Image (spheres, rainbow, N blue to C red):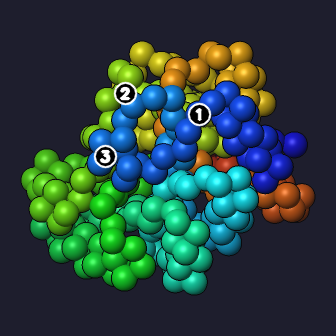
Amino acid sequence: MDFTYRKYNELLRALQNKGYAFRTFESFCQGNTEGRFVMLRHDIDARSAHACRFAKIEDAMGIKATYYFRIIPQSNNPEAIKQIASLGNEIGYHYEDLTLAKGDAKKAIVLFAEHLHYFQQFYPIKTISMHGSPTLPYDNRDMWKTFDYRQWGIIGEPYFDIDYQHVAYLTDTGRKWNDTQSNRRDKVESPFQFNFKTTDEVINAIHCGYLPDQLMITTHPQRWTNNFIRWIQELIFQEIKNKIKQYFLP
């Protein structure tokens, strides 16, 4: 079975065995950009308990990662955020304020400042990452056409502050890897183009040295579980969601 905690552990072991160091996105933005490394980015769209499980798996292996939380209750669980931060991980804001403001950039930036301040009680946030809101017309990154996130002490946003000519990007959006048929916004322009269907294919590519030395891997922990019933539920839900997202793709 794919998208289980066991499979995630295998993915991390493959990266370790191939000599990849693990860095947070914050560390990368602070200039730690040399050598062979992977940035693990986790977008917590829902089911924060799954994020805690990921953090425990990583902690047992001496790995630190970056966790982005939304403001909505399905993601914003203070106890989970505290637990993940206590393990030495980076916490960031998974913003969707332009969507919440229905496209009004002035309202969106007020919401952004309020929500960022809220999350800063858990961690001195230095990086943010947009939530894709794939079934809605607003691209949350568009608010930065009017405003500058650096004004709030933010040093990095993955869609703006990584040179993907040198860093390969892998994401499990759509419950696949770099799936172009059901991925509306979570993609980058890069010479490193991969379309893996399974995590085993990613692991095999790592073992064979097919991936470059610098990676960002984005996961959504809600998709990963060892519980068979939840695994089936997530599979069915994601297939339905992918069909809906395909309707909105150009």
Residue 210 point in image, percent of width and height: 62, 16
Q: Is residue 135 left or right of residue 26?
A: right
Residue 20's disc number: 1
Mark 3 and mark 2: span between their CA atoms? 14 Å
Decide: is 8 above or below 110: above
Residue occupying image coordinates x 78% and y 41%: 10
Q: Which residue position holds label 2?
A: 164
Give the secondary structure at mark 1: loop
Residue 154 point in image, percent of width and height: 24, 59
Task: Specify the amino acid type for callout 2.
Answer: Tyr
Mark 2 and mark 1: span between their CA atoms? 18 Å
Q: Residue 202 versus residue 248: which sits nearer the camera? A: 202
Q: Tell me if label 1 and label 3 are in contact, CB under 8 Å.
A: no
Residue 29's disc number: 3
Residue 104 point in image, percent of width and height: 18, 64
Residue occupying image coordinates x 83% and y 49%: 6
Task: Specify the amino acid type for callout 1.
Answer: Tyr
Q: Tell me if label 2 and label 1 are in contact, CB under 8 Å.
A: no
Given this view, does label 2 or label 1 mark the residue nearer the observer? Answer: 1
Q: Residue 170 versus residue 90: which sits nearer the camera? A: 90
> Quick check: can you spot residue 151?
yes
Residue occupying image coordinates x 59% and y 77%: 83
Decide: is 30 above or below 109: above
